C-alpha cells in the first residue's frame, strides 16, 4: 500500500537529490566564460522536461479530489523516478564538461588494450541491446593492440556513441563496433542501420549551442550532450571524431586513438 506519507517522502527525496547535484556543480560553472552561454541555455531548456514531469505527476498524486489505484500510484512514482534519473544524468554530463573546460579534469594517458575496452563496452550495453532486440556485432581483427590515452575518457566516449546508436536503431537492427589499425593510430568505428541523419544534422552534431532535434525510436529528443562530451574526450587525448550518415540508411561514427609509440 502506498500511503500519502510514503509518497511525499519519495517525491521530496528525489527533488532534494537533484538540487544537491545542482549545488555541487554550481562552483564548477562559475569560472566558465560567457561564450559558453548557448551551451547552458541548451541545458536549461532540456532540464525543464524532467522537472515538468516531476511537478506534473506530483500534483496528480497530491490532488485531494482524485482517488487513484495502487497501480496508478506506482506508475506515477515510476515516472517521477525516471524524470529524476534523467535530470541527474544531464547534470552529471554538464559537470564533466565544465571540469574539462576549466582544466579541473585533465587526461591521464596510459597504455591499455583497446580490444578489452571494446569488450567491456559491449558487455555494458548487452542487456539494453537485448531488450531492444538490437544485434551487437564486434569486429576485432587484431589482438593486443595497445593505445595511449586516458582509458576512462575513451571508454566513456565509446559508451556514449554506442548508446546513441542503440537509441536510433529499430528492433532487429544492428550496431557494429570495428577497430582498424593505421600507422600511428587506431580508428574505432560504430556503425548502425538506424534512422540516419540529414547533412545539416551531421554538420551541427558536435556544435555547442546548436540544438539537434532528432527523436529516437521511442520518440524522445535528447540534448546531444553525450556526443559533445565524446568529442571533448577524444580530442583531449589527441584523436579526431567524425560521422557519416544518410536519412534512413544508418550512421557511422569514427574516432581515432594514438597507438603506443
Image (cartoon, rainbow, N blue to C red):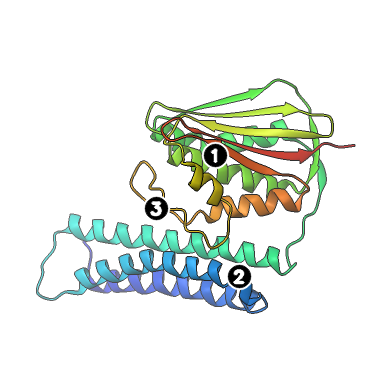
Residue ID at (45%, 37%)? 196
- In three-dimensional space, the C-alpha distance between marks 1 and 3, rounded to whole angstroms, equals 17 Å
With 181 as the anchor, is 74 left or right in this view? left
Can residue 81 be seen at all in this image of the molecule?
Answer: yes
- In the displayed orientation, state which residue is furthest to the front: 200
Badge 2: few (under 14), some or many (20 or more) residues near its Cα, within 10 Å? some
Instruction: For marks 1 and 2, give the one nearer the viewer.
Output: 2
Q: What residue sits right under mark 1 in the picture?
A: 162
Disc number lying in front (3 or 2): 2
Would you place residue 172 above or below residue 210 in this image?
Answer: above
What residue would you read off at disc 3? 221
Element under label 3? loop
Q: Residues within 10 Å of mark 3 (few under 14, many from 20)?
A: few
User: Which callout, 1 or 2, points at the residue further toward the start of the chain?
Assistant: 2
Residue 17, relative to residue 158: is it above or below? below
Instruction: Please tell me the numbered disc located at residue 2.
Output: none
Q: Which residue reaches farthest top?
A: 141
Residue at the (70%, 48%) spot, across then down = 234
Proximity of marks 1 and 2: CB atoms separated by less than 8 Å: no
Amino acid at each position: 500500500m502506498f500511503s500519502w506519507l510514503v509518497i511525499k517522502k519519495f517525491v521530496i527525496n528525489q527533488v532534494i537529490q537533484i538540487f544537491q547535484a545542482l549545488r555541487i556543480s554550481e562552483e564548477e560553472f562559475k569560472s566558465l566564460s560567457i561564450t559558453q552561454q548557448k551551451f547552458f541555455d541548451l541545458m536549461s531548456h532540456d532540464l525543464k522536461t524532467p522537472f515538468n514531469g516531476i511537478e506534473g505527476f506530483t500534483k496528480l498524486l497530491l490532488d485531494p479530489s482524485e482517488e487513484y489505484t495502487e497501480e496508478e500510484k506506482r506508475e506515477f512514482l515510476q515516472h517521477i523516478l525516471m524524470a529524476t534519473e534523467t535530470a541527474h544524468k544531464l547534470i552529471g554530463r554538464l559537470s564533466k564538461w565544465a571540469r574539462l573546460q576549466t582544466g579541473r579534469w585533465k587526461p591521464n594517458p596510459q597504455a591499455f588494450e583497446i580490444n578489452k575496452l571494446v569488450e567491456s563496452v559491449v558487455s555494458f550495453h548487452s542487456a539494453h541491446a537485448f531488450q531492444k532486440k538490437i544485434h551487437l556485432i564486434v569486429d576485432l581483427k587484431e589482438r593486443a593492440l595497445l593505445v595511449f590515452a586516458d582509458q576512462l575518457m575513451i571508454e566513456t566516449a565509446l559508451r556514449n556513441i554506442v548508446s546513441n546508436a542503440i537509441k536510433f536503431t529499430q528492433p532487429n537492427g544492428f550496431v557494429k563496433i570495428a577497430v582498424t589499425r593505421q600507422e600511428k593510430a587506431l580508428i574505432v568505428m560504430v556503425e548502425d542501420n538506424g534512422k540516419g541523419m540529414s547533412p545539416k544534422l551531421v554538420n551541427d552534431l558536435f556544435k555547442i549551442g546548436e540544438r539537434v532535434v532528432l527523436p529516437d525510436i521511442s520518440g524522445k529528443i535528447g540534448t546531444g550532450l553525450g556526443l559533445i562530451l565524446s568529442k571533448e574526450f577524444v580530442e583531449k587525448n589527441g584523436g579526431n571524431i567524425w560521422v557519416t550518415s544518410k536519412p534512413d540508411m544508418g550512421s557511422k561514427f569514427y574516432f581515432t586513438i594514438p597507438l603506443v609509440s
